[in-house]
Amino acid sequence: MLLSINYGVYDMMIVGGSGSRHLAVKLSRLMRIDLLDVEVRKFPDGEIYVNFLGDIEGEEVILVQSIAKQPNDLLIEFIFEAKTLRDLGAERVIGVIPYIPYARQDTRFKPGEALSIRIVAEMIEWSGINELYTIDTHLHRLKGLEELFSINVHNLTCMRELARYVIKNFKLNEPIAIAPDEEAKQWVRVFSEEINCPYAVLEKRRISDEEVELSIKDIEVVDRDVIIVDDIISTGGTMAEAVRSMKKLNARKVYAVCAHPILVGDALYRILKAGAEAVIGTDTIESPISYVSVAPLIASAILKRERG
Ligand code: R5P
């Protein structure tokens, strides 16, 4: 999808934090707005240094920063950047955080645990951004991000973009989409609607941080192409187990699809070794499987909103 809308009257700039440099370039091209450089480095003791290389006074700035892989560093960097943009006189700061971390810790599983996502949301809001765009945030017990933020927040889904990529690049035979757990039902539903195929949901029991157990009831996949759809691939434990179980049930080809390819350690190897034909993700997190860009989705959402 190519955007040919000229931003015209809006005086806007875009800046990519170190978690989303490439995505910021793609957005600046699509939206035809200037890219603002920021120098980010670490001192020998691990402290972070941020320096904007340009005049920000009176500007409306889009700050893009995915917060994955080194979530704590990138979160601090985002806060330094947003606060500094306001300090330097930015008129308005639109935060784009394609991946919001800590969303899976949305409750106290054990007494005494931190409610991490609530604290992170407070920090993001406190940074002074006026509005927030994000992609497929892991919502489970929370119904919407409005429960966490009082600023306007737009939780976009990239599931249709992923489905279109799969349709375009693979010749599917009697496809069926599978969610590895109940939480992923919200994503598989949208994905399968775009592909126009049925979907089913597995039951997951987490054994450890890296291992899960899946149970499958009444799902017929013999000689069908299966697409497993999840929001996150972290260690790859969930996806690898889902691929393995579909292969065991004599599925024809098994594809693994996710919004956020965190890909910790040898996650990709684990999934391919389990028998996946291909593993596909987006550039919410820059990775070797970021085949689908969320830039058009974000650009059109921002432009639509700004144009009222
Ligand atoms: C959890 O409910 C998420 O939707 C993903 O299934 C999970 O985060 C994937 O983690 P991993 O790749 O480590 O199994």
Image (tube, rainbow, N blue to C red):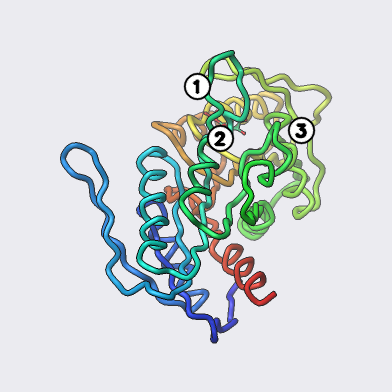
SS at circle 1: loop
Q: Which residue is mark 1?
A: 210
- Percent x, y of residue 295: 54, 63
**Looking at this view, is 147 or 2 the one in front?**
147
- Percent x, y of residue 289: 48, 48
Q: From this view, report whether residue 28 is shown above or below residue 106.
A: below
Mark 3 or mark 1, which has the lower sequence index? 1
The residue sitting at 39% across, 69% down in the picture is 89
Q: Which residue is mark 2?
A: 117
Q: Is residue 304 visible?
A: yes
Q: Which residue is mark 3?
A: 221
Q: CA distance from mark 3 to mark 1?
A: 26 Å
Confirm if mark 1 falls within 8 A of ligand 1: yes
Residue farthest toward the bottom in the current orientation of the protein: 8
209 vs 153, left or right, is left
The residue sitting at 72% across, 23% down in the picture is 203
